[in-house]
Image: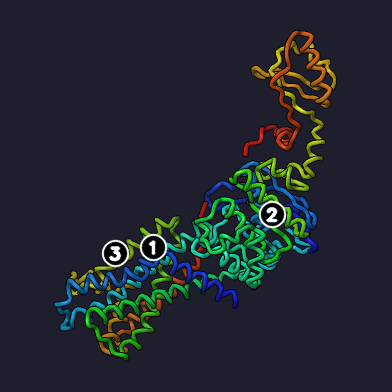
Amino acid sequence: MPGIGIKIEGVSVVYGGWGTKPVKALQDVSFEVEPGEIFGLLGPNGAGKTTLLSVLEGLQAPSAGKVLFGGEDISRQAESARPRLGIQLQHTALFEDLRVRELIEFYAGLYNVFLTTAQIQELLERFDLVEKANTYPRRLSGGQRQRLALAVAVANDPDIVLLDEPTGALDPQARRMIWALIRSLYEEGRTVLLTTHSMDEAEALCRRVAIIHRGQLIAVNTPARLIAELNAGAMIKTDLDLPLDTIQPLPGVIQARYTGQHLELESHEPGETLVALGNLARRQGLRLGDVSIRQPNLEDVFLQLTGQAFEA
Amino acid sequence: MPRFWILTKAMFLVHVRNRITLFWNMLFPVFLLVVYGLFFSSSEVEGIDYMNWVLPGVIALNILAFGLMSSSSMLVNMRETGVLRRLQATPVPALHLVSAYGLVNVAIAALQSAAIILSAALFFDYTPTAAGLLRAAPMIILAIFASVALGQIVSGVAPKAGVALALGQILYFSQMFLSDMVLPIDQLPGWLQRLAGYLPGYAITQLVRSPLLSGEWSAALGPQFLLVAGYTVAGGVLAALFFRWAPRH
């Protein structure tokens, strides 16, 4: 399946009307999602991710700017683009009195896609819902509900899949299962755009990410490149107690400091730094213990770009 | 199957599968009839056997309850839970959605009315005439449209399902004893009788009662017919203006 690219050009959304102070939910946001990639919109709650997704879904008209799907401007004709979209809203609410099998058939039918029994069975198997086919959504676990929401989102065989917080409050196992399903959508050539406030999820799943903060786009790139551009080292943490001036000259060390009872070292060469630190400790009659190493991640990128710690 | 019928089928299933909705939709109307039938079955109103007199009132009462409370709060509930928003994200035109919802509502309220008549025939020796039923049926359908349209104004202005239910109850109970439905209106003070004449409940009751009792359409009911038709149109326009896919933030 050839995916369809998404182009977002100068999109702004301003809420508010008579007697209320206007709220700029999005300010002049522009970026492109390439055909057939998994792209992540990353940012804390309230950053504007869901608003941007609502614009793409045609549920929110932009105050300015435009959106193109495969080169076609859909900003003023959102309805015409909907048949190509697979949508999972943040709080996916489905009719609670329709069974899982009926819901898949129902939502596909709303797109004029009439699934055969075999096609429904195929979707049930793919999303691991066979045993729940005749169950009402209220009796499903969180993970099962999310898998159902995904099954419903792709029941119309969309080119573009828009997922709003697809793993929300799921446990790690359910989360990984959803990740595998999202990757399978990518393998089929669909363009996947998802929002997340999980840095782990963005790094694990997305080829590229856009970081949004307070309605503004602050960075777009692959997670690896964003992290590399930080030029930050790995963070080594240990409970060793030595004078800082003896630690600073060790190989690879960028900076060293004490936070509470812990020594924190930022290093470009964490392996060499650790060996040297172990030797230094031994010479002082001490033992290197309680060591942890953390590679720089997207949280550090967010901190550097916004001056604020990332709080989901 | 066209999208409209897919939506209609789904909404019908949602209505009949929900036990609470089912109770209020199918058992409550019969319960109303039984209560009034048992307590007042031996009396007469305006020289008419009470069951013959009250049955159209119970039908009208139930139509009002359905439109103002059940139908309105169900739509608010669909809006609150995000079901409407999810439907908005599909290519289904809003007109299909509204039409499907309206059709299911009309079908259910019509079934309720039939259940009331059937129960009266089975348990209270009520014997309607074919001419009466035939002529009352279009009035019942018009009344349902009016009540559902008024109920959708409630759903449009109410921020939450609980508020919609409360507003619906105020409108329903305020008409219950003022509309000649289950208690004769001539026992009210003159000014209140004149006011009651403009209430949808009163007009609906007269429109349904007259053909059921006489088997004919009376020209004297023209004003009531126009009033209910007016409530339907005005209610539909206002409901469309107030309609929202998602809750207000």
Q: Residues within 10 Å of mark 2 (few under 14, many from 20)?
A: some
Q: Is residue B64 above or below residue A238?
A: below
Q: What label sits on residue B188 in the rendered view?
A: none
Point 73% across, 14% down: residue: A287
Q: Residues within 10 Å of mark 1 (few under 14, many from 20)?
A: few
SS state under label 2? helix
Q: Nearer the viewer, residue A97 or A217?
A: A97
Question: Badge 1 is on which residue?
Answer: B20
Question: Badge 3 is on which residue?
Answer: B173
Residue A70 in picture, x, y percent from top left: 78, 62
Residue depth check, mark 1 versus mark 3: number of the one nearer the observer:
1
The chain holding disc 2 is A
Q: Is residue B50 above or below residue A107?
A: below
Q: Is residue A174 visible?
A: yes
Residue closest to the far top: A284
Q: Do callouts 3 and 2 mark residues in contact (Cβ within 8 Å)? A: no
Question: Badge 2 is on which residue?
Answer: A181
Q: Nearer the viewer, residue A51 or A240?
A: A240
Q: Quadrant of residue B2?
A: bottom right
SS state under label 1? helix
Residue A92 in picture, x, y percent from top left: 57, 56
The chain holding disc 3 is B
> Can you say which quadrant of the picture contains the N terminus of chain B?
bottom right
